[in-house]
Amino acid sequence: MTDRIQILIQGLDTNSVASVTRTLDQVKNLEDLTVDEKICLTEAFFEIFAHAHHTNSTSMPKLAVRAGKRIAKFGPEMMPVLFNRLVEADSETANYYGKALARNGVAGLNYLFPKLSEHRSRDHDLINLIQALAYFKIPDAASTVPFVLSVAQHVNHQVTSMALYTIGRLVQQLPPSAFSDELRQFIFSSCFRFLSHAQGLVRKNAARTLGKMLRKGLLSAENEKKLYKAFLSICGRDEQHNWDRAFIVRREAEDFLPFFHHQSVPVRRYTQSYKIKSRQLLCANTYHLTIEAPLIARKIEAGQFVIVRPHIFSERIPLSICNWDRTKGTIDIIVSAVGKTTTEINAMNIGDAFEDVVGPLGERSALPTSPGTSVLIGGGYGTGAIIPTARDIKATGNKVIGIVGARNKENLIMVSELQAVCDEVILTTNDGSAGMGGLVTDALREVLLREKVVYVLAIGPVPMMKAVSEMTRPQAIPTFVSLNAIMVDGTGMCGACRVTVGGETKFACFHGPDFDGHKVDFENLMKRQKMFVKEERLAFEHLKV
């Protein structure tokens, strides 16, 4: 190793973006490199590949690609070095070696392709080598397709999946003229058979490759018609309404259905648009949204909730339902912007669609078991959540009193809607600007003195629900609170929303969200709610709406 190369390599810190950038810039300006110098630099650049997927920096993967381009510029002499590393690489770094090899064009293809047969008995090697073929962008690469399709018959479904992935990449990036009519038919027939493979990953890549053939215009009219029927079946839009059990396969087929230009795509009976039908500002940073979700509207009951994701990269958050219309197929939610995701939601407009809405989740609210007065208390945006239960209790013939609390009159929301389902509604504001001056517990105290209260439901901030529960405890009045614990999956599988009720662990998403307020460990709940305050703040600071 020459001194100039040794100095460069010794100064290379593959954990530092600045160091890697500086080294690549210096190498770019070097002239008259010997083969030995190129090999030394190539081996050093391999360390960049290894670090690219083990860093939080978004720049390092880009620098790894840049390093691969530089290796390719060193010439065909580097191909044996690249190949030896390629067959040994893990799945995360193999793509960098493959891309660098593919940048050698025809020379790289002529070197790589004969090696495939030699390594056919080694599954790991074969997967990496087939993936490398996917990065070639020269028409000659189409000649490798028959061999890759023969490899797709492998007993290892991971090899099969990678082979189909590679075919899809070649279909996408090579010109249509690279594929003869015979080759197009061969690809279609082979991939179509894999739509019935036992492994979902194989079916997914087969569907993707066939979809890419459709978009590139590589299908005959007969094959396009055949594929259309297959994709309808996968998505559950055919007459039998069956669908592929793997979501990843259905998603591929759904994405390509719009590209069948001469076919009418029937609406699947499971389809929900999640579009925003109406949007109303209730108070500062708080909106009332009506969302199209007919399947949820058909099943939702008072007290149940949904988990929503506004965009594909958003977190999933639980939201209460304040109303629904089974005939129109809509649900209503109230969203107060207190963090990143709620702010993203409130930035959406009429016609925008949520990425997904899951529900109805949880158990419906309990109803009073004896005649008397029921008191339903809403704090802030929790006011909307008590409306469905108030309506149900009113229908049983019990007297219903609603209590609404807010900081000031500007923050009182959904009052008229609550009045429509209650016999009486009492307003409280902290500053006395509307209704009673004070807290919801002040209003509750007055009601308890004059009414035979048999049921209390409180939804809102945790301190408010705790205070209500303590007030009704001495009289043993059945009191329920809706726990807004941190949730992830919403089905009781992840355990993120665990709460302590009566000394036992419960899941708010599955056993709740309503629980006996006299048994809830509110201190534990408040501690768990603060677990990700720092992360939530950082996410909000980086929010771009």
Image: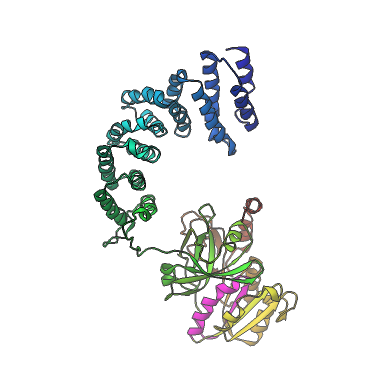
Pinpoint residue 40: horizontal percent, then vertical percent: 54, 17
The quadrant in which residue 158 appears is top left
Tell me: residue 276, above or below residue 497: below
Residue 503 in view: no
Which is more toward the observer, 188 or 310? 188
Quadrant in the picture for the N terminus: top right
Residue 251 left/right relative to 356: left
Q: Residue at x 64, y 83 (%)?
A: 447
Which is more toward the observer, 170 or 488? 170
Tell me: residue 175, above or below residue 495: above
Quadrant in the picture for the C terminus: bottom right
Pinpoint residue 439: horizontal percent, then vertical percent: 70, 75
In the rendered image, the residue lying farthest to the front is 177
Q: Is residue 149 magenta?
A: no
The quadrant in which residue 15 appears is top right
In the rendered image, the residue lying farthest to the top is 2
Count of picture labels: 0
Residue 363 left/right relative to 464: left
Pinpoint residue 151: horizontal percent, then vertical percent: 29, 33
Pinpoint residue 380: horizontal percent, then vertical percent: 64, 71
Q: Residue at x 44, y 63 (%)?
A: 273
Residue 227 left/right relative to 35: left
| Span colored in magenta | 368-396
Q: Residue at x 63, y 13 (%)?
A: 3
